[in-house]
Image (cartoon, grey):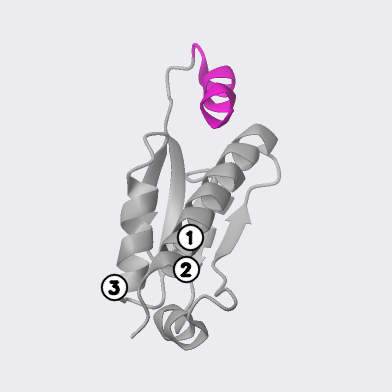
Amino acid sequence: MFVLLFGVLFSGSSNSKINVGWVDEDNSQASMGLHNAFASVPLLSLQSGTLDTEKAAMQHGDISAIIVVPSGLEAAVARTAGKSSAAIQLFTDPSQTQTTQVVQGAVSQIANGFNLALAAAPRS
């Protein structure tokens, strides 16, 4: 279903990449793993920066969304050990509804995969 959604939205499009801002406030192995997961999505092109610079880029139309990994994500993940979740933030451009839906779907899929991987990780 996910592949069909991408195919429908981008069939015949000359620019098949969605530019997304990436703000890593945690700078940890967990956030690096998330970055790698998002970077592996063929339709997303990540651009790293601070929240202020990425918000300015979205206001200028250079990016369609911003993914923010908050400070303390890795510590929260270690502390909760799969009992609850640590949140990442997603900012989207409300004027780009189709793109927003695709980005939200990708974020949801990757976050779910990340949570499943954490739940399956051996506990020490």
Farthest residue to the top: give it.
12
Q: Main SS type for the magenta part?
A: helix
Q: Quadrant of the N terminus?
A: top right
Q: Amino acid at mark 1?
A: Leu
Q: Secondary structure at mark 1?
A: helix
Q: Amino acid at mark 2?
A: Ala
Give me the residue at 57% from left, 73% from top: 85
- Residue 37 location in percent, x, y? 36, 52
Q: Amino acid at mark 3?
A: Gln
C-alpha span from label 1 to label 3: 17 Å
Based on the displayed image, in which of its 4 quarters is residue 45 positioned?
top left
Q: Is residue 96 left or right of residue 71?
A: right
Q: Are marks 1 and 2 in contact (CB under 8 Å)?
A: yes
Q: Read off the magenta span.
A: 1-12
Label 2 vs 3, first from the N-terminus: 3
Residue 119: mark: 2
- Residue 19 location in percent, x, y? 44, 42
**Residue carrying label 3:** 29
Of discs 1 and 3, which sits in the foreground?
Answer: 1
Q: Is residue 54 above or below residue 92?
A: below
Q: Is residue 40 left or right of residue 104?
A: left
**Residue carrying label 1:** 116
Q: Quadrant of the C terminus?
A: bottom left
**The one of 35 and 61 positioned closer to us in this rendering:** 35
Based on the displayed image, in which of its 4 quarters is residue 103 positioned?
top right
